[in-house]
Image: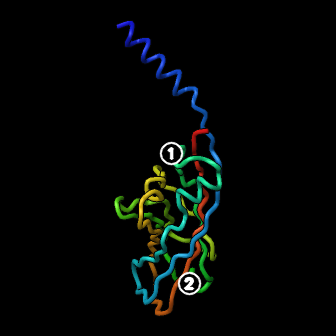
Amino acid sequence: MRKIALSLLLIWVMTGCTNTTNIEKSISTVVAGEMLFSGPNSLQAPVTTSVSSLTAELSIKPSDLSHIEVSGIQISMTGEQATLAESLLLQIVSNNHEMTALGSLSPLENGPSFELNLAEETDILPFIEDEGATWVLDVNLSEDIMDEMKATAELKLMINYKN
């Protein structure tokens, strides 16, 4: 019993001594779609942020990354297209992970730029580690748009890593 208690104490001390760092980073992507009809539609873009680019920028090993949390999402569109949008939902999906909601806003107020309400669990590290990760912006439209629709997603990320 004494050995178990001592082992647990040692594990607790060792994990408590691991220093972690949080750093905020902003990324931007343009999601697009065309021939969109009144009602729900999806705009998409591949996730271009990679573990190798993040770890190189931070001068750390990939295994040091703990999690990457989304701490803010702003969606911007042209004024004309923004007036046709009724709601927004930003999600992420990859080859080996199911689609996960990151933030949403409904109804939309006037303006070409919208700050989304964040979902509770927003760790996107598993998606970034996986191949085929895609940003998906679901837009509910009040009218058809036959031309290409683009929106810029600005994400604030809180990157947590061991040092």
Mark closer to the observer (2, 1): 1
Q: Secondary structure at mark 1?
A: helix
Give the residue displayed 56% in from the left and 77% down from the top.
151
Q: Position of residue 76 (x, y in %)?
A: 61, 74
Q: Callout 1: 10 Å neighbours few (<14), some, many (20+)? A: few
**Residue nearer the viewer, 40 or 5:** 5
Check if mark 2's residue and mark 1's residue have beta carbons within 8 Å: no
Name the residue at 61% across, 68% down: 28
At label 1, the amino acid type is Ser
- At label 2, counting other C-alpha atoms closer than 10 Å, the crowd grade (few under 14, some 14-19, many 20 or more) is some
Residue located at (41% from left, 64% from top): 131
| Residue 57: % across, % down | 65, 55
Q: In this figure, which residue is indicated by the disc labeled 2?
A: 81
**Residue that carries the numbered disc 1 in the rendered image:** 63
Mark 2 residue element: helix
Question: Does residue 98 appear in the picture of this structure?
Answer: yes
Question: Residue furthest toward the bottom?
Answer: 146
Which quarter of the figure has residue 116?
Answer: bottom right
Label number found at residue 1? none
Towards the viewer: 134 or 107: 134
Q: The N terminus is located in which quarter?
A: top left
Nearest to the observer: residue 139 or residue 4: 4
Three-letter amino acid code at the position of disc 2: Gln
The quarter of the rendered structure image containing the C terminus is top right
Q: Earlier in the sequence, mark 2 or mark 1?
A: 1
Query: Can see residue 109?
Result: no
Residue drawn at x 57%, y 45% as measured from the top left:
160
Q: Nearer the viewer, residue 94 or 110?
A: 94
**How many numbered marks, from 0 up?**
2
